[in-house]
Amino acid sequence: MNQPATLTSIVSPLPEKLLRTLLASFVVILCLQTLLFSQTQISTSPDDKTLIVEDAPEMEVYALGKSVIVKQRAKGVLAFGGDVIVEGRVDGDVAAIGGSIIQKDQAYIGGDIIVFGGSYKPESRDPLREPGKETVMFGAFEDELRNVAQNPTQIFSPSFTFTFFAHRLLSLLFWFIVSLGLTTIAPGAIGRAVARVQLSAMKVLGIGIVSFLLILIGVVLSFRYLPDYMGAIVALMAFVLLMLAYVFGRVSIQMSVGKFLQKTIFGGRSRSETIALLIGVLTFTLLLSVPYIWIIVLLTLLAGSTGLVATARTKPTWSRE
């Protein structure tokens, strides 16, 4: 006589079946991954400085601190801190930040070409390009961007060499001249900005952080939903806007900090704005030279500068908190 099935006899086979299913799925995934990598044929050079793409027609290739050589096919290429050398065919966009794009003779690029900190160098007088595609090129800071990409830790801990101190001395002189000139040309705007910093620095900083994040989100969305060349233009406009805001804001913040330190050190014996400006410039030049600390100071300056520009039309009527 057959015994009725119990709860234990029904449940006990389930873990074994589940385990077999998981093992089979894992084997299939490994096989597919092996097949994928065998088909794409992507390797690195012996010195580990170059990414060699033999045939990856469906792959977007991204490289950090390495150059990229496309031997046969790739869907798209982005190199940060290295060159892109196209010997075969790239159906999509090709971009290089801190490097150049070299298109060999008979090579084909089907998308836009975007170069920041480098140049576009086609070997043919009439390179094979898709009609209507754009070339956006901004050739500056190539060595700096390349060095940062290949050795990113240097931005946190710079080496104290003669060149380092010479750069800081030049920076001190540059920012003092710029600050002196800007306060002479637009004393009212600088004075109102200094008043906003002194009355409510935290509110200005908070507004600056929000504005800075909104600009970054706008740039990301422009790259996501707009054509690549329009996204590059939006990013360049945002960069220029932030740099102009940084100059204005840094001069204002240096003046504000300089006046505070001048009052603290000299009391009421010195009221010279030139001396206050020199103290402020010297203070931030020193802070921006301290390893690890300088990145926090730079971000604070950038956020505060953006906040000062965003609140430029408001009157400094906030109460000190």
Image (spheres, grey):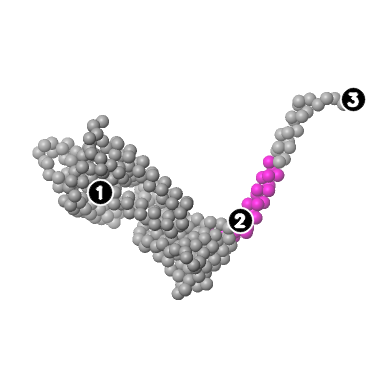
In the image, what residue type sits under mark 3?
A: Met
Spot the residue most to the bottom. 125
- In the rendered image, which residue does mark 3 sit on? 1
Q: Residue at x 20, y 51 (%)?
A: 182
Spot the residue most to the left. 269
Mark sitting earlier along the chain (1/2): 2
Mark sitting earlier along the chain (2/3): 3
Q: Which mark is residue 37?
A: 2
Residue 215 screen position, x and y as percent: 38, 47
Segment colored magenta: 22-46
Residue 51 screen position, x and y as percent: 51, 60
- In the rendered image, which residue does mark 1 sit on? 248
Is residue 241 highlighted in magenta?
A: no
Q: Nearer the viewer, mark 1 or mark 2?
A: 1
Q: Is residue 294 visible?
A: no
Residue 263 screen position, x and y as percent: 15, 37
Q: Residue at x 66, y 45 (%)?
A: 26
Task: Left or right? Give the position of 256 relative to 69.
Answer: left
Q: Is residue 68 above or below residue 15?
A: below
Q: Secondary structure at mark 2?
A: helix
Q: Residues within 10 Å of mark 1 (few under 14, many from 20)?
A: many
Q: Nearer the viewer, residue 89 or 37?
A: 89
